[in-house]
Image (tube, helix red, strand yellow):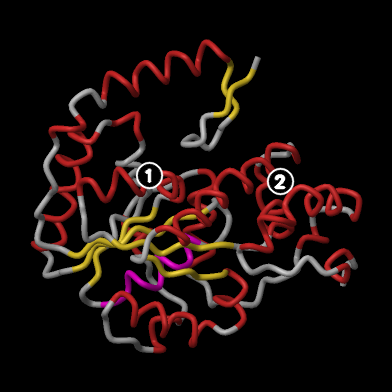
Amino acid sequence: MRMIEKYSVEHRKPLIQWLRHTANVILNNVNMRWIKPLDCGVQSFFIVGCGHSGTTLVTSRLARAPSVYSPGWETGLFLPIHGLYAASTSYKVIANTALSNGKSIVVEKTPKHVHCARRILALLPTARFIVVTRNPLDTCASLYRRFPDLPYCIERWQIDNSAALSLLKHHTQCFHLRYEEITQDPERSFADLFKFVGVEWSADFLSQGKTPYDNFPHSGNMAKRAAEVAEPILPRCNTWPETLNVHQAKQILQRTMPLAAKLGYSTAPHQLSPQ
């Protein structure tokens, strides 16, 4: 028997593992109601969404602003397994590092934090969210190259984007970025994003070059992403035929169309025609 644990990349858990994880979450959060909001002297932004949707790319460019500090890795601080006391202690370190480097804004990117808005706002009431989405065909194709299990990829898109939609509907402190817009018209998309964050925009931030991910050793998928986002931004839309066949694409659309439409994505038949 498998259970769904939405906070984990590997979200399908055997029952025993799920029960142990749930017990640890409960134990680590028994003091949650006594944790006070954190006054750390920086404005906090959280980049969230489904993995393989462009969150690393967004972070790499936003962190080039002189007033922005990004840790350069996915901290996962607000995932329930850690508890809010541990999150508070660790986030203070991040904020102090930003301040000591003359930065007034912290941008943290952990896609799975899309499920953690309530926990984040309990600790950082003025936190704001940058929600990144990507159409289900291209997202699932990208996930499939890493996890060759199509039902898993579809579930992952549904689980994380359901949370993204809820966040966009119920919180006013959000900015919605679509991967397609980022790659097709990066100047306009990033100019709007920088306005939301409250920092001066420059087209120079889009150029190829150093990103915060260069400062830390990465391996596996994160190393690949770190290298990719240092390159120039190129259009990457409707690329699913490089990985999936039409039958697989139909499976994806059949299960994702209602949610995709609510996020502003067309599911027109021409999307099933490889170009």
**Residue 23 horizontal/vertical position (percent):** 37, 16
Q: CA distance from mark 2 to mark 1?
A: 25 Å
**Mark 2 Cα-neighbour bin, 10 Å: few <14, some 14–19, many ≥20:** some
Q: Main secondary structure of the magenta part?
A: helix
- For label 1, the residue is 116
In this rendering, position of residue 211 left or right of residue 142: left
The label nearer to you, 2 versus 1, is: 1
Above or below — where is 208 with respect to 94? below
In this rendering, position of residue 185 left or right of residue 90: right
Give the magenta part as a residue range.
55-65
Q: Amino acid at mark 1?
A: Cys
In this rendering, position of residue 249 left or right of residue 26: right
Viewer-proximal residue among 139 and 22 = 22
Residue drawn where x is 67% and y is 62% of the image:
135
Q: Secondary structure at mark 2?
A: helix
Residue drawn where x is 34% and y is 86% of the image:
201
Viewer-proximal residue among 214 and 58 = 58
Residue 58: in magenta span: yes
Quadrant of image for the C terminus: bottom right
User: Which dot marks residue 144?
Assistant: 2
Residue drawn where x is 54% and y is 52% of the image:
50
